[in-house]
Amino acid sequence: MQADIDAGLTSARPVAVDRAMRTLDLSGAVRAKKVYTTSPDSDAVRAPILLDRDFTSDRPDRVWVTDFT
């Protein structure tokens, strides 16, 4: 309803929209907060970067790479 008013499709006062929505038992969409499931440990020691971002290899099965993200 508010989107129609903002787009100029309907002319109604916000108070009238509130009253109509309450009468029809409607409510606006509520967006959920983002849930962070992990937090870094500030005391943890990071693993060393052994490849220094050089992913080339002189033969097969010499270098394996994975992503933990």
Image (spheres, grey):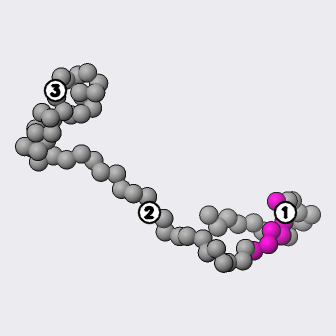
Q: Quadrant of residue 11?
A: top left
Residue at the image position 15 percent from the left and 39 percent from the top: 18
Q: Dot 3, how many residues are within 10 Å of its Cα: few (below 14), some (14-19), or many (20+)?
A: some
57 drawn magenta: no
Instruction: Kindly identify the residue that appears in the image at 18 percent across and 33 percent down.
Output: 14
Which of pointers 3 and 1 indicates the residue nearer the eye?
A: 3
Q: Nearer the viewer, residue 13 or 6?
A: 13
- Helix, strand or loop under label 3: loop
- Left or right of 51 in this view: 5: left
Q: Where does the magenta region start and end?
A: 47-53
Give percent across and percent down for residue 17.
15, 35
Q: Amino acid at mark 3?
A: Ala
Q: Which residue is mark 1?
A: 52
Task: Return the residue at label 3.
Answer: 12
Position above or below: 29 against 56: above
Residue at image coords 11%, 48%? 25
CA separation, marks 3 and 1? 63 Å
Q: Which residue bears the numbered disc 2?
A: 35
- Foreground pick, 9 / 67: 9
